[in-house]
Amino acid sequence: MRTIRLTLAYDGTNYAGWQVQPDRTTVQGTLEAVIEKVTGQQVRVTASGRTDAGVHALAQVAAFTTDSHLTTDVLQRALNAELPRDVAVLHVNEAADGFHPIRDALRKRYRYVIHDGSVRDTLRRGQCWQYVHGRLDVDAMQRAARALLGTHDFSSFETTGAERLSSVRTIYDLPVERGRAGGGDLLTSELAASDLVTVEVEADGFLYNMVRAIVGTLVDVGRGAREESWVADVLDATDRRVAGPTAPPEGLFLVRVEYE
Amino acid sequence: MRTIRLTLAYDGTNYAGWQVQPDRTTVQGTLEAVIEKVTGQQVRVTASGRTDAGVHALAQVAAFTTDSHLTTDVLQRALNAELPRDVAVLHVNEAADGFHPIRDALRKRYRYVIHDGSVRDTLRRGQCWQYVHGRLDVDAMQRAARALLGTHDFSSFETTGAERLSSVRTIYDLPVERGRAGGGDLLTSELAASDLVTVEVEADGFLYNMVRAIVGTLVDVGRGAREESWVADVLDATDRRVAGPTAPPEGLFLVRVEYE
């Protein structure tokens, strides 16, 4: 048996998330159906993590085992030909036996995009949080975010119901930026980039809804409802009820997953 | 009566173009229905030019006359509240009596976006030409485009059936670029920008399908099917049949319209 590693991009707008669910269109279900069509084999595809309904991926990593003899090139071409336009296979590689996309992941990076312009961005519908309550103070958000760097119990940023053994994670990087200074966005006008706030979070692992809870909390600071120092208090409380709201899914992108 | 000038952004994917057509959803028709709802008056909205089905606008300019007493601020808010998410009113201004968005336009600028990566861009579906036949030679396209700068009869780049009196236009600027060097696109990975080729055309006016015919012609050069010098021959022929194919609508964006 071969273990095949896939790198996937998808627009999550039209999917009920990654994970297979009865009577719902999911990325996993769509992919498994296409793999069966191409290889003739029913497989189970595992991803580095489940993305929720509406969440996007620039480079999700997934894997499955097969005894198909198709080369990785042929497999990539055939999968892309059969997949709907909002899912694409960026790379296909042979992985070592026993490669497991969740267990073997060392780091993951997410990006969250907020549009806080006074008028909605028509070309990014479903690909950002249209924040309509005024301008966010990005510098305050960036300073507040520093409290989250490093190794902590992130229970305050974990939606309950999850079944992970430990809530301790390490955040390596958490930049908050407006407009990516100097970055000319290719699709919108040059001015529109200044309406975009990005929050990126890189960590050794993520609890359920962790990025969205962090973003919701930082936005409470950015809109002036909370002091910057409040974020450290939220972290210390290890209680989801004290943090800010969960930011909506459509602003969230899985950017990359790192392995050995 | 007041003349109201609107600056509009829209994603043209779900519209049969700008112009009202029976039994089709158009941007003009959608806007006129919303203006009637907000002001109680039936109006005719005129734009700086008709965009075709699937073509987008970053800053289309349109105008209508009304004796409504709503302030421009209230009008903008009310229109944006009623419009679908893929159309937005960026600005509302009082215009001089007799302001005419087509006749008074001095210059217009369009952008055409081509994605020539080997795998489709899932997040730009409907917002670029997914060019799947290999890498385009952008330098050759840029050199070939120089022949089109200045004042010429652009009949070779005009879809027949249009009824304009003259096919003479002046192109002021026609840059062809890959990846907007240094421009970090906010939504895709940093690598993906290198898969994007943009062609921008600024002119004192445009013939029907002119940008798309120019792009189709430059792509024939970029893919190596034609010499760079061929573009000057196409221009001289004043015959649409000798130019390249019309590029698909989804890559086209109306960027801005300039008035006195």
Image (cartoon, coloured by chain):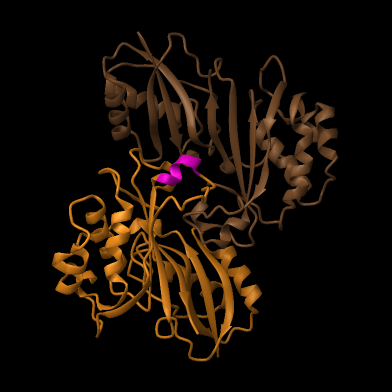
Chain colours: A brown, B orange
Q: Position of residue A14 (x, y in %)?
A: 46, 40
Q: Position of residue B192 (x, y in %)?
A: 44, 42
Q: Quadrant of residue A245?
A: top right
The quadrant of the picture occupied by the N terminus of chain B is: bottom right
Q: Position of residue B195 (x, y in %)?
A: 39, 45
Query: Compared to B64, does A174 lie above or below?
Result: above
Asked if one can make out residue B248 in the rendered structure from this viewpoint, the answer is: no
| Residue B191 on the magenta segment | yes
Which region shows up in magenta? B188-194
Nearest the eye: A176 or A78: A176
Nearest the eye: A61 or A234: A61
Query: Compared to B202, does A60 lie above or below?
Result: above
Q: Position of residue A43 (x, y in %)?
A: 38, 16
| Residue B5 on the magenta segment | no
Residue drawn where x is 83% and y is 43% of the image: A228
Q: Quadrant of residue A37?
A: top left
Nearest the eye: A137 or A240: A137
Residue drawn where x is 46% and y is 74% of the image: B257
Asked if one can make out residue A74 in the rendered structure from this viewpoint, the answer is: yes
Q: How many numbered callouts?
A: 0
For the stretch drawn in magenta, the main secondary structure is helix
Query: Compared to A237, does B45 lie above or below?
Result: below
Q: Quadrant of residue A168?
A: top right
